Amino acid sequence: VAAGSTAQGTERPALRAAPSSLRRDTGSTISLENVDAVRSMLEPFTGINIAEIDLAADATRETVERDYAPDVELRTLASGIGTGVEALYRGRDGLIRYLQEWLEPFSEYCVDNLDYIEAGDCVLVPTNQRGVGAGSGARVDIELTTLYRLRDGQITRIHQFDTLEEAREAAGL
């Protein structure tokens, strides 16, 4: 199957997020600006099947370059090891590779962001994620919390946790 198409021959939409307008990194408003920045990056994906996003599209690359630092680091769920993903991904290419590896087995995958919690230079986002296996049709429900650390309006660190409490502890709350 060629990049940008599905097995059925239909074009996959590109990853497109709302522009992150909050690029300041000064003063006591940084925490709320980080929350607003993460929200603006994630909310465009609410209610859509992200398994259909064309991760090889130029628009996807542009979005990743705008919203994520070149040295972004992603640490996956400890409980997710063995599901076809590695424990650590580095750089923008690593982030895209993670998304490809994670989403590949799914025909449908949706994420509901339940909250955006400020935590200094971090934002915690508890989520409910649902997927349907492409081959098996098996349904999967996952609850996890992701910690996003920002610098100059770009995400520099992503760390997935099984619980909100673990994420709060990692953020120093």
Image: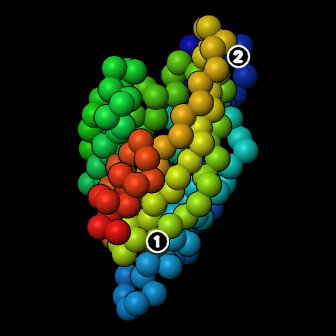
Nearest the eye: 164 or 146 = 164
State how far apart marks 2 and 1 are (Cα): 42 Å
Q: Is residue 81 above or below residue 120?
A: above
The x, y position of residue 143, in whole percent, is: 53, 40
Label 2 vs 1, first from the N-terminus: 2
Q: Is residue 13 above or below residue 36?
A: above
Q: Residue placed at 46% from the left, 28% from the top? A: 102
The x, y position of residue 15, in whole percent, is: 59, 44
Looking at the rendered structure, which numbered label has been put on residue 9? Answer: 2
The x, y position of residue 90, in whole percent, is: 27, 44
Looking at the rendered structure, which numbered label has been put on residue 118? Answer: 1
- Asked whether, in this view, residue 121 is left or right of residue 114, the answer is left
Quarter of the image with the N terminus is top right
Q: Residue placed at 54% from the left, 34% from the top? A: 142
- Asked whether, in this view, residue 24 is left or right of residue 112, the answer is left
Amino acid tagged 1: Glu
Q: Are marks 2 and 1 in contact (CB under 8 Å)?
A: no
Nearest the eye: 94 or 83 = 83
Amino acid tagged 2: Gly
